[in-house]
Amino acid sequence: MTKIGLEIHCQLTKLESKLFCPCKADYREFEPNTNICPICIGLPGSLPRLNKKALEKGTVISLALNCKIPEKISFYRKNYFYPDLPKNYQITQFDAYGPTSIGSNGKISIEGKEIRIRRIQLEEDPGRLIYEGSSEKTQITLVDYNRAGTPLVEIVTEPDFENPKQVRIFLNILVDLLENLGVSEPALEGALRADGNVSIEGGNKVEIKNVTSFHDLEKAVHFEITRQQSLVDRGIPVELETRQWDDRRKITVSARSKEEEQDYRYFLEGDIPWVTLDPQHIQGLKNKMPESISSKRDRYVTQYNITEQVADVLSSDKFYSDLFEQAHNETNAKEIANIITTDLMGFVDTNEKRQKLKLNPQHLTDLANVIMTNKITRSSAKIALQEIVNTGKSLSDVISELDLGHVSDESALSEIINQVIKEHGNAVNEIKEKPETINFLVGKVMQKTKGKADPTLTLELLKKKLIS
Ligand code: ZN
Ligand code: MN
């Protein structure tokens, strides 16, 4: 049987400072090697201090993934020699003598299948290496320590996935969950990275490293299963090894013989004391956690009669469900959910457009109101929405500027109807025998008003003029 396990690194991008020093957690805007201090570049004599907020975010993620939180946590040094690691060790967590990392033994269900979470650990990100040209041929490697020491949460699963599709579904759910918790921004480059390990029946475990996007991880796992299967089929043993994902060629290549955990010589980080977690504080964090995606979805269906499909789309996207929460009330909820999922999501389909979005919750409330009171047709509402998204103008301004309102003034409409009756004498004569012909005349009125006539009023007036 194919077994796939994942190790996911998630940057805690909503924090102010790094994991063990006061440098900025948001390293992205800095000139190289300017967001650094003696602690994060490991100068002798400097001492790390744990970021309390990072510990809280790690706790919240562990709770959301149904992990056990230990009474006390400790930190370990993971030793390896690489230029992106200024101290030659990474401060991380490790369950050498029982669970002392922030979370362990969790689980999450994906489409009825349970995926076990082995461990969740807080750790520091290394610096960034920048190769001049391609990484194989380059003579020059630049190093930028701005990222060194920024807070990461690593999520380690048991090898419970059986195929690449399950991996993809899990990662999608995890991205939505982390975003909903407000701990990370998946849209930021490098905020979420994943490594995988794959073993098939009769082969050794192969680790896949260097996958920089979740999308590529599914491809990498798929490639690896196919590669290993073709080896086994030909009677060639699958070696225990680490392979790098080659982003350009979309294949895995042999990297080095696999390092075993003992090669890292984990030992306790003596510069950071054990931290006792106060159960009351953890309960407080639990109480303040945002509503989960699944409970949001169920609530939308039962409370507002929103279809399951719309509720699914809306609840899993924090950006839009926040907008919905601010805009809706008991009566307009369904209409607003439909406006968001059918029209707005189409207009605002990239992260960049989300950031530039001029629309506020009040716009949605107003829009639902004019649709529900029949003051504007749905197609006109869509035109108005597009204009609001781009300009942020009020709905009433947009309706009058673009002339989108219904023609519901009886005398104006009556005049147009009289014209239509004059122009379509044949149809008018047919009405006695074929009453449905009246719909043809309604259509003609709509045409003349470019879809802005109030259809109910039009039908009423036509009947009054022709039938009674
Ligand atoms: Zn620092
Ligand atoms: Mn790690």
Image (cartoon, rainbow, N blue to C red):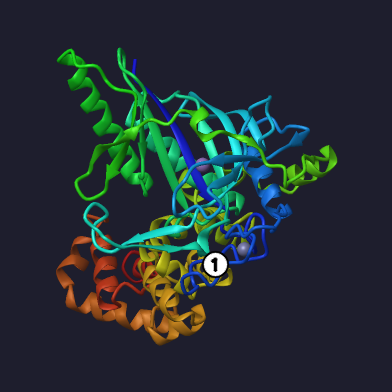
Q: Nearer the viewer, residue 467 or 307?
A: 307
The image position of residue 445, as x and y in percent, is 28, 73
The image position of residue 357, as x and y in percent, is 46, 72
The image position of residue 379, as x and y in percent, is 35, 67
Q: Quadrant of ligand 1?
A: bottom right
The image shows a total of numbered marks equal to: 1
Q: Quadrant of the N terminus?
A: top left
Please indicate, yes or no, whether residue 298 appears anywhere in the rendered image. Answer: no
What residue is disc 1 on?
Answer: 369
Please indicate, yes or no, whether residue 278 appears anywhere in the rendered image. Answer: yes
Kindly give the residue lying farthest to the bottom in the view shown.
401
Q: Nearer the viewer, residue 454 or 434?
A: 454
Picture layout, residue 58 above or below residue 69: below
Q: Quadrant of the C terminus?
A: bottom left
For badge 1, the amino acid type reads Asn
Relative placement, left or right, of 382 versus 426 is right
Q: Quadrant of residue 202?
A: top left
User: Residue drawn at (50%, 25%), measured in percent from left and top?
Assistant: 158
Relative placement, left or right, of 217 versus 182 is left
Confirm or reject: label 1 Cβ below 8 Å from ligand 2: no
User: Residue drawn at (43%, 47%), measured in percent from left and top?
Assistant: 193
User: Residue drawn at (21%, 67%), measured in percent from left and top?
Assistant: 428
